[in-house]
Image (cartoon, rainbow, N blue to C red):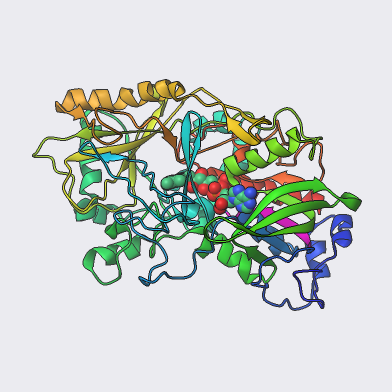
Amino acid sequence: MSDHPPARTRVSRRGFIAGTGSALGLAALNVHARPAAASAPIADGADVDVLVVGTGYGGSVAALRLAQAGVDVHMVEMGMAWDTPGTDGKIFCNTREPDYRSYWLRTRTKAPLSNFLGFPIDRDIPRYTGILDAEEFGGITVYQGRGVGGGSLVNGGMAVVPERANFAAVLPSVNPDEMYATYYPRANAGLGVSSIDPEWFETADCYQYSRVGRKHAQRSSFPFVFVPDVYDWDYMEQEAVGTVPKSALAGEILYGNNHGKKSLQKTYLAQAKATGRVSISPLHRVTSVAPGSGGAYTAVIEQLDTSGGVTATKTVTAGKVFFAAGSVGTSKLLVRLKATGVLSGLNGEIGKGWGDNGNVMCGRANHLWDPTGSLQSAIPCCGIDNWTAGGAFAEVAPLPTGIETWASFYLSITNNPHRAQFGWNAAAGKVELNWRTAWKQPSIDMAKTIFDTINAREGTIYRTDLFGVYKIWGDHLTYHPLGGAVLNRATDNYGRLHGHPGLYVIDGALIPGNTTVNPFVTITALAERNIERIIATDL
Ligand code: FAE
């Protein structure tokens, strides 16, 4: 049984494995016109050339480039498709009114900023396969996007390339010349990255909070930097003058943007689908990948309903499998499959090298004569770079509450040295992460190199009402999980998993814990680099 029409023109798996030694040769085998990719979910018993687990950055790059090289790809995504409006006519809900669409299988929201003026702001919601997962491990809550497009659905779109001088610490085994000459530019082009018009920035009401952030940074002699984004800046300017429906200027971000944001659905995935070779199964979760016959793999996939219940279990054969379930998703799968003997050839590096990108949040209370504005674009556009001197890069982040808060809010990325490990708890039957909350202290110390200085210069204090009662630091979470199947350790230098030919990791799990800036451009660029090599040599 197959998910493809019988008269399919795809390369058979045997042909695919034998290959021709080059992507061009493989593409040349597929000269017939292609039917549009099937929209039906994957069928039980299907036999696919390539299975991609997850539809975030790494998975989307892999799917597009493989399809362009003539390979049929099936993508499996545990979250929803996010292509159908709800009864309010909108696909995504607003941060100010979180509803059933907001959280992945929770009955109460778990907002990263839990309090305001000391009062808890979380509320009850119906349990649903919502868009943002606040996944709780012992010492940390890891926020992740769930749905076709992965983290691109929920993130701030900040598209930052690390300083070249810092790259050796980010990916020590990767040649920086090829990254900065070829793969970062390719990633930026594929993602649709651009920068705010500096003239508009100076006058836009919605960036008053950023101008206040700049003033305070510069008065304390910290380098202030504009940060590119995948949000459509022209669209935002139209939002500001009221000619289009508002999204960033209506507080939309964490639970999806109904307009303006170039998520992967609009970039890599749209291109991938247009090849006719890529099909996607939303609300399908991969639970196992095991060696099958003839060098192929057998994947077990659960189909979910919107309350998280399993409605079907399918078994699929795949010639090659790309793990792109995100740092946490990929690590959890590989750690369990190794520990339970399903993928016994994986090496001892599986699960190791996990970091939180040094994320820590804080707010500062400004003077009454320094308002940050009641209208704040939910899309950040600038940061304070004290990485070299103090180990911190701080985004000037919005508090899009719709009212004046006199608060400056920051998400700092810091050079935190701690790395955690995923491990299999056989008794509990689950994968755990041994991160400890106390390990955030170096991050706090690094962030303080910026904000203690600014507070002293401005005569201001930290806000204590955003993460609880009298709690300054948001040290309980990360938006940027990285590592768990680190490049050149758990895999070779291109993401091929040791011990099982035909299995690859192609997502944030490859990066050993820190990118010095926001991570998705580096995840995308690394995926571009690795898939180019894999297509050239493995197919
Ligand atoms: P990711 O995008 O997480 O995609 C993995 C996909 O796999 C998800 O769609 C999962 O639902 C799916 N999946 C997981 N397990 C399974 C399974 N077993 N079966 C099937 N599917 C599965 O991975 N980064 C920036 O660079 N700039 C920002 O401004 C920024 N802001 C952020 C704001 C928030 C609130 C959050 C949560 C993250 C933010 N990030 C930002 C981080 C960024 O989104 C993240 O690093 C990437 O999305 C990770 O990309 P991956 O391809 O590794």
Say whether residue 425 is left or right of residue 517.
right
**Is residue 169 located in the magenta-colored stretch of the structure?**
no
Q: Quadrant for the C terminus, please.
A: bottom right
Magenta part, dominant SS: strand
Residue found at x 49% / y 68%: 83
Residue found at x 80% / y 52%: 298
376 or 386, which is in the foreground?
376
Residue 394 in the image, given as x and y percentages of width and height = 35, 35
Say whether residue 538 is left or right of residue 456.
right
Q: Quadrant for the N terminus, please.
A: bottom right
Q: Quadrant of residue 484?
A: top right
Residue 366 in the image, given as x and y percentages of width and height = 16, 35
Indicate whether 386 appears above or below 34: above
Residue pushed farthest left?
369
Indicate whether 182 appears above or below 243: above
Residue 484 shows in this picture: no
Residue 315 shows in this picture: yes
Indicate whether 187 appears above or below 164: below
Residue 40 in the image, given as x and y percentages of width and height = 66, 71
Magenta span covers which residues? 47-55
255 or 274, which is in the foreground?
255
113 or 178, which is in the foreground?
113
Residue 37 in the image, given as x and y percentages of width and height = 67, 72
Residue found at x 39% / y 60%: 257
Say whether residue 70 is left or right of residue 529.
right
Q: Quadrant of residue 171?
A: top right
Residue found at x 61% / y 57%: 77
